[in-house]
Image (cartoon, rainbow, N blue to C red):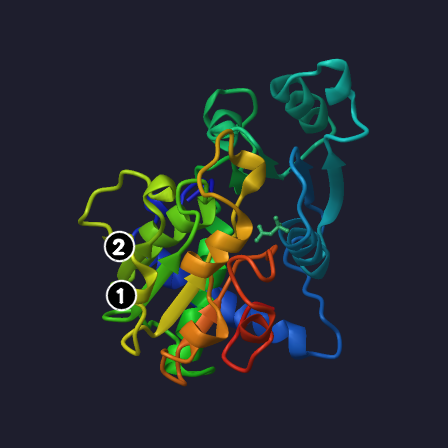
Amino acid sequence: MKHLLSTADLSLEQAIQLLDLSDEMAMVNSREVKKLPTLRGKTVVNLFYEDSTRTRVSFELAAKRLSADLINFSAKGSSVSKGESLKDTALTLAAGGVDAFVIRHSASGAPYNLAHNGWTDVPVVNAGDGTHEHPTQGLLDAMTMRQRIHGHGNTRGKTLDGVSVAIVGDIAHSRVARSNIHLLKTLGANVTLVAPPTLMPALPSALAAQSFDLDATLSEKFDVVMMLRVQQERMNAAFFPNEREYSRNWGLTAERFARLSNKTVIMHPGPMNRGVEIDSNVADGKQSVIL
Ligand code: CP
């Protein structure tokens, strides 16, 4: 596998291999010296055309802990403001000798163009493209679910067979939802999407069950409830009356949380709109794995 563009490209074997490796690598974080020589002499470019906190810092940390040389390219403050294209930017950076591009872009498909248009032969990792996919977030979420459901240290080779996952909120604009839906299906989980009709995309029913009624759907049966951010910045119309109304109908409030099992894992990819899709006391509670 040269590129990581979509979780839909991963076979079950590849997904398990990546998750097993991630569990091993995560153990490096508990060592006194959190560094491995794996990428010594290699250069990684973080190509960020869209804002990010978690993903940019995670990729920076990962490159540094694997001993790579790192270039953090941010579109803001670069010659992109003078009209330089993604192709010319990538060619310019690649001319300096690059071994991997990590790209975040507001245009769905930008990582695919970078990987497959013949501009360079550098491996590409998609760090989130428009409303399309966020495969490393999907892998991180699956890794977290495996650890919580099977127990830390007991995940090797394990799938998520039969695990019940509810993904709730602005699914239409969520690249995280799309990456999770594909990967969770591959890993054998049962996914239920819950959203207002205006924020539910057309998806094959074989991928996930769908509901437009959160109160009728939330129950103790869910092993995982993943709340999604309302992505106002991608909305060009009024998809719901106002934030208060959204929270009343679609938010994970303390009252709704009380209907879940005391083992249900609460997730949210971040950044959160506290008090809109999730209440602070739920987000900061013991069952939350958001951080
Ligand atoms: N979850 C996530 O992608 O967060 P950032 O936008 O802060 O990277």
> Where in the figure is residue 200, as x and y percent of width and height?
33, 43
Residue plotted at (39% across, 78% down): 264
Q: Is residue 143 above or below residue 83?
A: below
Residue placed under numbered mark 1 in the picture: 216
> Where in the figure is residue 3, as x and y percent of width and height?
47, 40
Q: Are marks 1 and 2 in contact (CB under 8 Å)?
A: yes
Left or right placement of residue 157 versus residue 235 in this view = left
Any mark on residue 176, and which?
none
- Return the residue found at the far right: 77
Q: Nearer the viewer, residue 265 or 218?
A: 218
Residue plotted at (68% across, 41% down): 51
How crowded pointer 1 is (Cα within 10 Å; few <14, some 14-19, many 20+) is rated as: few
- Between the residue at mark 1 and the residue at mark 2, the CA separation in whole angstroms equals 9 Å
Q: Nearer the viewer, residue 77 or 261?
A: 261
Amino acid type, mark 1: Ala
Q: Quadrant of the C terminus?
A: bottom right
Amino acid type, mark 2: Ser
Residue plotted at (49% across, 75% down): 254
> Where in the figure is residue 2, as x and y percent of width and height?
46, 41
Q: Sequence order check: which comes first, mark 1 or mark 2?
A: 2
For the question of whether residue 12 can be seen, the reply is no
> Where in the figure is residue 255, as x and y percent of width and height?
44, 75
Q: Is residue 264 above or below residue 130?
A: below
Left or right placement of residue 81 versus residue 128 in this view = right
Q: Is residue 105 above or below residue 83?
A: below
Q: Nearer the viewer, residue 204 or 189?
A: 204
Q: Quadrant of the N terminus?
A: top left
Residue placed under numbered mark 2 in the picture: 211
